[in-house]
Image (cartoon, rainbow, N blue to C red):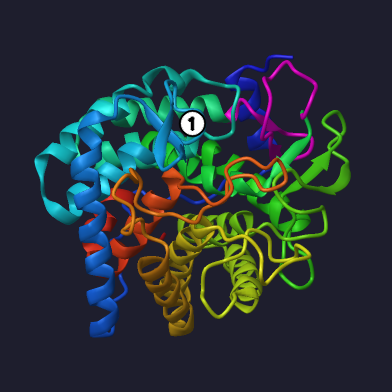
Amino acid sequence: MTVSRRTVLTAAAASTASTALSTAPTPAAAAPVPTPTSTERTLRAAADYAVEKLRTVAPNITAFPVGTKFEKWTYSTNGDWVGGFWPGTLWMAWLHSGEETFQTSALASARKLAPRQYDTGTHDLGFLFSPSWVTAWRLTGDDTWRAGAVQAADSLVQRYNPRGRFIRAWGALGDPKNAGRVIIDTMMNLDLLAFASGQTGDPTYLDIAVAHARTAQRVFPRPDGSTPHVFDFDPETGAEIGPNTVQGYSPTSCWSRGQAWGIYGFTTMYRRTGHAEFLATARRLADFAVGALTPDHVPVWDYRAPQQPYDIKDASAGAIMACGLLDLSAATGRKTYREVALRLLTALAETCLTRNSARAEAVVARCTRNRPAEDGIEISLPYADYYLLEGILRVLRPRDVDRAIDLSSV
């Protein structure tokens, strides 16, 4: 059944108390925290390496990288769910280097995502449009990018189920398969809705984001702070069915990249709303993940798979987690989260870059896309490159990153 935007927004407004908006977000207020000189040197060298790699590879890329095969990028023409990360990575390279060619390439790449702003068949519109179109608007002021991102938010709210108060993850709106399936990844797509409320003055986008986040914080975290990848609902009644997984080892395990999405996503929702419950949830997830890290500070692909802690790694989980922990440290004032984030970024910079391969086209190696499906084991992934650079620049150039992705809080 196709639901109109008006119906979705009305239902959400009726079921969720309107969330206060900040009409003029304040800049990130926290004073810069000193970084050890040796750490800063390591991170700067990694960022320089990334820029050098991108300078060589970017001129030959005409589609969206989705993962590597034999160290060379494979592509999607429409962006799949990862299309926003390539222009986002180019934006990060521009912020670090100041080279205009990166800005030009970022804009050209982002334009190719234009048809996706009308895509109601995926929850991944935040991944697609936040690091590409929202960032383009913030850095250029061109209203085309702002309007497209708001249209993408309009498409995303079509996936809201008011009975269960969740945003459906997968499947076309009229397809009953997966109609009640919610995944932890969606926490990272909610900021697009916060952006749309801030730009339009319509609080209902953010109301939907808050409703979904409250549902997620009720059903995903276990008592110890770990999370499953999936939680299923009856789409007709909204009744809970239970945890499940697709990319984790089992419904009772803890897929490390999903845990990282949760840390970052709940912290972002706290920053956008000021709701302490989201910050508390982010801390629970972070404390579990920090405790589950191996001494080398490169996460295994699943913290509860039978072969951990000696299992296959996922460097992308480490990069995402580092960004989330830096955010969480700023939100809580707890330096320990920042210290772990720096150890994560340092470990990635020292042990996971592609420096030893002349043929490699990506920056970060040792990533795992989908271990249960034997899809993309120990390869490179575009979001690893993006979040590594975001994390490093959060440390080296926090004001520049704030210009690009908005580190402010209400």
Quadrant in the picture for the N terminus: top right
Magenta-drawn stretch, dominant element (helix, strand or loop): loop
The residue that disc 1 covers is 153
Q: Quadrant of residue 212?
A: top right
Image side of residue 404 versus residue 239, left or right: left
Q: Nearer the viewer, residue 211 or 281?
A: 281
Q: Quadrant of residue 174?
A: top right
Q: Nearer the viewer, residue 114 or 305?
A: 305
| Kind of element beneath mark 1 | helix
The x, y position of residue 382, in whole percent, is 42, 43
Image side of residue 110 versus residue 259, left or right: left
317 inside magenta stretch: no
Q: Residue drawn 81% across and 41% down?
A: 232
171 inside magenta stretch: yes
Q: Can residue 32 be seen by looking at this rendering?
A: no
Image side of residue 309 versus residue 345, left or right: right
The x, y position of residue 79, in whole percent, is 44, 27
The x, y position of residue 161, in whole percent, is 72, 32
Q: Residue drawn 59% across and 48% down?
A: 377
Q: Can residue 361 be seen by looking at this rendering?
A: yes
Magenta region: 157-178
In this rendering, the answer to whether 295 lies above or below 73 is below
Q: How many marks?
A: 1
- Going by the numbered disc 1, the residue's amino acid type is Ala
In this rendering, the answer to whether 174 lies above or below 105 is above
In this rendering, the answer to whether 220 lies above or below 211 is below
Quadrant in the picture for the C terminus: bottom left
Image side of residue 91 versus residue 323, left or right: left
Q: Nearer the viewer, residue 15 or 191?
A: 191
Q: Residues within 10 Å of mark 1 (few under 14, many from 20)?
A: many
The x, y position of residue 138, in whole percent, is 25, 42
